[in-house]
Image (cartoon, rainbow, N blue to C red):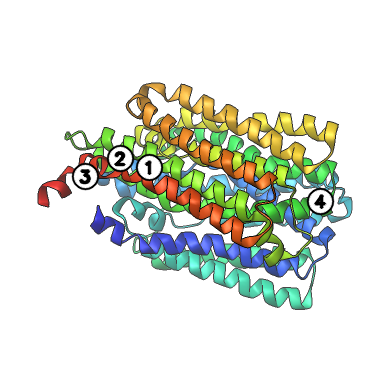
Amino acid sequence: MLRHMSKGYSLMLVGLIEMAAPFVRMIALSHTLSLLELGFVSALTATVGAFEQISDFAIYRYVFSAAREEYDDALAAAHGLAILRGFAVGALVALAAPALARLFDLEGHVYDFILLGPIIAIRGFDHLAPRVSERDYVYGPQLKAIAASYGASLAVLLIALHFIPTHVAFVISLYAQVIVQVAASHLVSGVKYRVAFMTPRFFAAFRFGYPLMFNGMGLAASYHGDRFLIGGLLGLPELAVYSVVTLATVVPSGLISRVTGPINLAQLYNASKSQDGSYVARLRLSARVMPLIAAFYALGVIALLNIVVPLVFGAKFFLSPTSTALLGLSIFLRQARGDPFVAMLMNEGRTKRLAIANLASTSALVFEAALLLIFHNFEAVMMGRLIGEAIATVVTLVITRDLFRPAFGDFLKAVAVGLVVLGVAIALGSAGVGLSPLPSIAMVFGGMTVFGFWALSFMPSMLDASFPAIRLKA
């Protein structure tokens, strides 16, 4: 494992780029655009993100799980399906443009929404081999492609903002990003680009992926549905504030998943091929570690959000202590119900169950809409999100009870420890901690100490059971 983990620096860099680039982009936009224009950018971002996720087949995951002797045919079929999906979704965005413009009270800007369609269509020509190489702990080609695409996007954005300080600069940067991403993925893949349509592998890829469309619906509603509600009910300036604050929390959590997700899936995939009991041991270890990681990150949100975000983006980007506490708890539940559940279901090919788990989170939209209509503030949105994440967590545990049974107790213990620490942090936050740097940093270190001591109580024995080959060599 240590040999594989040593290769993970490239994966860490991929995650860092994917986290840093949106931050840099938002910093540039927030200091250049008005709240109205920044809200427009948030509306465009939500549109692209929602349509991408709703139609996400996770095609490269199909190739990832295919037998190695079937790799070439599976990759060609996945490319064919990705191209068809790109054109279909791009056309849907163009058709939905008038309705989207009306929703955000931007009837005079329909063409701006139409321009999002070709971006998704171009992305369909991405070479998938760099992503599939995660199976063998190879992340270098993917790092090169992502670095090139984000670097080009940010450079174009900064230049465009100088001459066109509006949302148009953002759209131009999206085109630069997707074009460079596709070109770079072909240059670094090391595998000939082949496309196959209507083959047995093509239909197998579709059968693998279509349930994930429902999973994508859940993710789209969970990640972007609130933006449509806020933009439609509270207005674009309020959407701008909300987007900045949530970007500062969701993107780093995405970094965590971007690093831990492939590692969890690879470890379970490789252990499932052995008969030494390491699969169950690794599942139990992940069930304890992942909620602790989620709790530590949520603790940082509760303690530091209203210190860091106004400092970086400006004083107007601020949440109340109540909103911050609700946001921290919802982030904790979202992260805790991710891996190892996602990796376990992907490894087993149970994509329908994964779709059900994420669709459950769409219940948040119902609560958000109802509470927004009653209270008309951010606290209503945050409470709705928390309720939805709680429901999704329960559903995830129920639908995975047969597969996850050996690690169920470990997961509950880790969640309980996390909730206790977060509860103390929220209580301290209501007393003013979270507004002053030194007490807030002390609170984070205190929570880290608690998590660290508890982890030391189980890590040595669980690591030995999870990686018996390393233990025997030692």
Say if mark 2 contacts mark 4, CB within 8 Å. no
State how far apart marks 4 and 1 are (Cα): 41 Å
**Badge 4 or badge 3: first in the primary sequence:** 4
Q: Which residue is mark 2?
A: 458
- Give the x, y percent position of residue 218: 60, 35
Who comes first in sequence, dot 3 or dot 1? 1
Counting from the top left corner in percent of width and height, residue 182 is at 51, 62
What separation in Å lies between label 3 and label 2 (alpha carbons)?
14 Å
| Residue named by callout 1 | 454
Tell me residue 37's x, y (percent): 81, 61
Along the horizontal axis of the image, is 11 left or right of 299?
Answer: left
Residue at the image point whose x is 17% and y is 33% from the top? 275
Residue neighbourhood size for the residue with mark 3, other residues' Cα within 10 Å, grouped as few (<14), some (14–19), many (≥20)? some
In the image, what residue type sits under mark 1? Answer: Trp
Label 1: state its secondary structure. helix
The residue depicted at 24 percent of the width and 58 percent of the height is 3
Q: Is residue 470 visible?
A: yes
> Dot 4, crowdedness within 10 Å: few (<14), some or many (≥20)?
many
Q: Mark 3 or mark 2, which is nearer to you?
A: 2
Q: Amino acid at mark 4?
A: Glu
**Disc with the residue nearer the chain's start (3 vs 2):** 2
- Seen at 44% across and 64% down, the residue is 13
Q: Amino acid at mark 3?
A: Phe
Q: Which residue is mark 3?
A: 467
Mark 4 vs mark 1: in front: 1
Q: Disc number at residue 238?
A: 4
Mark closer to the chain start, 4 or 1:
4
Does residue 326 lie above or below 410 as drawn?
below
Residue 33 screen position, x and y as percent: 79, 67
Quick check: marks 2 and 1 in contact, CB under 8 Å? yes
Residue drawn 69% across and 44% down? 430
Q: Is residue 291 above or below residue 121?
A: above
